[in-house]
Amino acid sequence: MRTHCYTVEAGDDGLLLGDYLRLRHQYSRRLIIQLKKGGITVNGQHRRMVDPVAAGDVIQIRLGETETINLLPNPDLQVPIVYEDADIIAFDKPAGMAVHPCTKYYNDSVGNYFAALFEKEGLAFRPLYRLDRDTTGLCLSAKNTLAASLLMGKLEKEYLAIVEGQLPQDEGTVDAPLIRVPGSIITRQVDPDGQRAVTHYRVLQRTATHTLLSLRLETGRTHQIRVHMAWLGYPLAGDTLYGGQDTLIRRQALHCHRLWLPASPERSELVLTAPIPHDMAALLPQEGKNHVF
């Protein structure tokens, strides 16, 4: 169970409790509605969200009283932990591992390893974004509803990708809408009737046959980087679904490398990194393997 305490400052005297939580601590409306059912006190007493707070009031919020393990724990998995505190945990997800279990991969996902780590605490698995099964890198999960609410939609990610060919522009933006390919469950394509998708890229290194890119996303569409790069004519190495070749790497060369997290009441602004994996580094010249990615 996670407990958060706040002391109301003079400038917030008279604010309604719900407005105080929303304006000063970025609580979502959904979480405020959930707290109406219990888990919040002011000076040790129950208060309604429409009641005003006063300077010096101590607000205490308890989260997680009813959480239970919702996945099959698997402690035998190997998933490096990049960072952990009372509210979040970040993994360096390997290739070939799903974030959340599915019918085919029901016991070998990041979620199954999370369940094993926190089996005694009974924490629910709350990944804040998804990575494709064969995309590596930073995978962040919140340990409680408040942490998830404060971070959802506020994370910034940098991806590393290796595309086939020499991309001529040093940097650029792809603004091309994506839609699911008719008759396919997973494959996407650029289509004017699709949802807007925006990808910013910057060249880090060129070789005779490949280009290493840094990419940031304004939108988070399924397969966005993979489809956008293929649409430009430079598919990701190993990405056979979108025209890449798998002779040098057996999966799409895509890695979630860096993650920016905003400050919270308990934590300063945080930047996490996961080094480029060996199979991607092998596509670069020997001297490139010593770069700090």
Image (tube, rainbow, N blue to C red):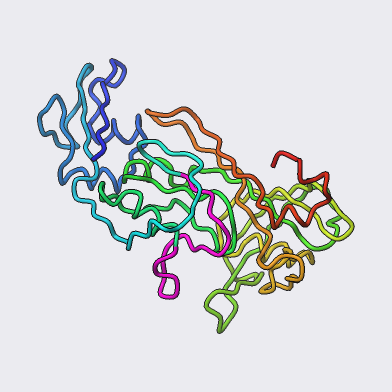
Residue lying at 27% horizontally and 56% vertically, measured from the top left: 69
Residue 200 left/right relative to 22: right
Residue 101 or residue 282, whichever sits in front: 282
Name which quarter of the figure residue 187 lies in. bottom right
Q: Nearer the viewer, residue 271 or 77?
A: 77
Q: Residue at x 21, y 27 (%)?
A: 59
Is 264 within the magenta?
A: no
**Could you tell me what secondary structure mostly forms the magenta stretch?**
loop
Image quarter for residue 76? bottom left
Residue 101 is left or right of residue 251, and the answer is: left
Foreground residue among 64 and 47 = 64
Q: Position of residue 206 (x, y in %)?
A: 85, 51
Q: Position of residue 98 (x, y in %)?
A: 49, 63
* Residue at (26% x, 43% y) in the render: 32
Up the image or down, 263 lies above or below 181; here it is: above
Q: Point out the residue furthest to the bottom here.
A: 183
Residue 101 located within the stretch drawn in magenta:
yes
Q: Residue, x 24% and y 54% (percent of image)?
A: 68
Q: Position of residue 195 (x, y in %)?
A: 57, 64
Range of magenta residues? 90-108
Q: Residue furthest front?
A: 76
